[in-house]
Amino acid sequence: MSLSAETTASDGLSRCPWSTGAPELTAYHDAEWGFPVGEDQRLFEKLCLESFQSGLSWRTILNRREAFRAGFAGFEISAVARFGEEDLARLLCDAGIVRNRAKIEACIGNARRAEELITQEGSLAAFLWRFEPPAEELAEPQTLTVSPSSTAMAKELKRRGWRFFGPTTAFAFMQSMGLLNDHVHGCILREPVQRARAEFTRP
């Protein structure tokens, strides 16, 4: 997300400026964005949704998230990894999601790569949290859309056969899943997220 100074929302509270344009963005910002996540299924869902967002707005994806969850078996990794041609055809006919063949095929393929990664690394979470940026790398809310850590994450996933997940997508994923606290100073969520990160047990 693009960040700058905080913006006062209609309820009089200060938030990250990207979150004040629509009620669903505000709800997502307040309840999810930046809070650390350690569950493989939630992390895999976000990996997929960030890939689907490429070239689109997050609001578009957020408004279709429940349809995505229904279409992709709740993003249960083992279930998506078993999807075949019938599932691909079903998803290509599903008007509730983004019907992009390459992205759908990438999500299915990435589920298979996720299974391999879990076997090799113990969990998806353990692997992804290794790319948490050091404090000196991202000490302040960012105006950039990529970082050395997001580049490293994307490069390693690509090496392992993942698709549709470049450095910019990786950075957005890291922001949203709490690998860094990118809420702007003055945002009502910056301190709660900071506390949650301090209390979070890294996998």
Image: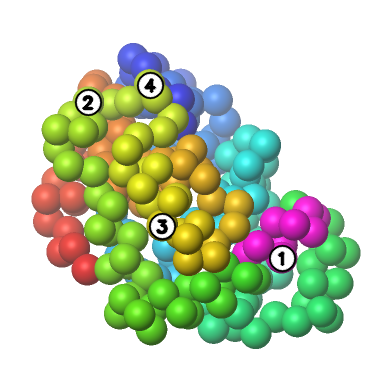
Q: Which residues are magenta?
A: 99-107
Give me the disc on residue 88. none
In the displayed structure, 62 sits above or below 21; it is: below
Q: Which residue is mark 2?
A: 140
Whole-percent x and y of residue 22?
A: 57, 31
At label 1, which amino acid type do we have?
A: Glu
Please tell me which residue is depicted at 14% across the width and 46% down the height of the picture.
Answer: 195
Q: Position of residue 130 (x, y in %)?
A: 25, 58
Mark 3 touches mark 2? (CB < 8 Å) = no
Q: Earlier in the sequence, mark 3 or mark 2?
A: 2
Residue ID for mark 3: 156
Q: Which residue is mark 1?
A: 105
SS type, badge 4: loop
Q: Are marks 1 and 3 in contact (CB under 8 Å)?
A: no
- Tell me the tag on residue 143: 4
Q: Report the Cα–Cα distance between label 4 and label 3.
A: 24 Å
SS of the residue under disc 3: helix
Horizontal relation, residue 63 to residue 93: left or right: left
Could you tell me if residue 111 is visible in this image? yes
Residue type for callout 4: Thr
Tag nearer the camera, 3 or 2: 3
Q: Mark 2 falls on what kind of element?
A: loop
- What secondary structure predominates along the stretch shown in magenta? helix
Secondary structure, mark 1, is: helix
- The earlier-in-sequence mark between 1 and 4 is 1
Task: Give yes or no for residue 123 being in the magenta stretch.
Answer: no
Alpha carbon distance from label 3 to label 2: 25 Å
Residue drawn at point x = 79 percent, y = 59 percent: 101
The reply, left or right, for residue 194 in relation to residue 54 is left
Dot 3, how many residues are within 10 Å of its Cα: few (below 14), some (14-19), or many (20+)?
few
Q: Position of residue 125 (x, y in %)?
A: 32, 67
